Amino acid sequence: MAFSILRKGLNLGKSLQKFVVLKKAAENIKVESVKSGVTTLTCTGCYCSLTPKLANFEVANRGFSSKRDAKHHHERKYQSSSESDSDLEEWLGKRGNSDFWRRKIRTLHSILDLNKDGVVSFDDFKILADRFVDLGHLSEKHTKEFYQVIQDLWEKQFGEISPYNFVTVENFLDNMHHVINDKRLVRRAHSFLPYLFKAVDKDKSGEITVEEFKLFFDVLGLKDEDAVLAFRAIDSNGNGKITSKEFVKHGRDFFVTEDEDRISKYFWGPLVEH
């Protein structure tokens, strides 16, 4: 019994000795931690604990968030610059006043007017979309997206889908004039172009040859010889191929530029007469 009491006393003494050592160590840590601003020491009657300062974690988190936000901002900036021509801000509100631009837009209206009755309807849009889908090169996913893009494009630019909603040449000119002078709309004017490219990219290589470009013109009801001329103009490096990026860029430039020297004027075939 006496031996047991003695052993417990020794153990208690060792525990007290450890506590004193730990508390001294903790006090030393407190001095260093206060200097570094990393932790806060809290001592009770039974123990001492080190707690990280929340402010430092918040600062670190803000630093991480800033880097992440900067990355996202860079990505948005890259996307914006890749989707808009360099003088977008300068010319916003001033485009679409030249006879040359109006001639290009009348050309596009003529292509969309499939039955040549002088007006464009949603049926024309849908039939032309069907022609590209029927080539059989769009995936099921891209086909659904394509039809949705066509529908959204019509509703945003021309209003309701109705058999009585007809777009004349003058309506089309007025609408496109509004589109290219609206910062938000002009960036969506080419949303359907990537699907046209995919539809004629038979081997899904991401590049189209002159034969595949002829297919594009054929769907539009244009001649092979005109396709060859347009392809040679757009294929600026002469490698016999047009990438998706080039295709979309020149297709979009057709809408927004009034520069008669831009090769994009050939994108939709020969321009109609004045």
Image (spheres, grey):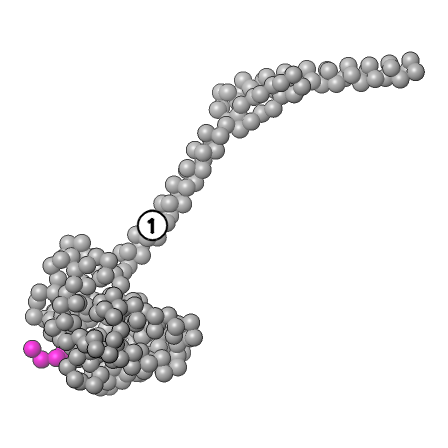
Residue 67 sits above or below residue 199 on the image: above
Q: Secondary structure at mark 1?
A: helix
Can residue 203 be seen by looking at this rendering?
yes
**Residue sticking out furthest to the right:** 1
Q: Nearer the viewer, residue 37 or 206?
A: 37
Q: In this image, 113 relative to 205: left or right?
A: left
Q: In this image, 263 relative to 239: left or right?
A: left
Residue 5 sits above or below residue 102 on the image: above
Pinpoint residue 139: horizontal percent, then vertical percent: 42, 75
The residue carrying mark 1 is 74
Residue under the point 26% across and 63% down: 188
Residue under the point 45% across and 34% down: 58
Can residue 270 be seen by looking at this rendering?
no
Q: Nearer the viewer, residue 154 or 251?
A: 154
Question: Does the magenta-highlighted stretch encompass residue 272?
Answer: yes
Q: Main secondary structure of the magenta part?
A: loop
Pinpoint residue 123: horizontal percent, then vertical percent: 26, 80
Pinpoint residue 109: horizontal percent, then vertical percent: 17, 76
Residue 90 sits above or below residue 61 on the image: below
Three-letter amino acid code of the residue under disc 1: His
Pinpoint residue 136: horizontal percent, then vertical percent: 39, 81
| Range of residues picked out in magenta | 270-274
Looking at the figure, which quarter contains the N terminus? top right
Question: Does the magenta-highlighted stretch encompass residue 253?
Answer: no
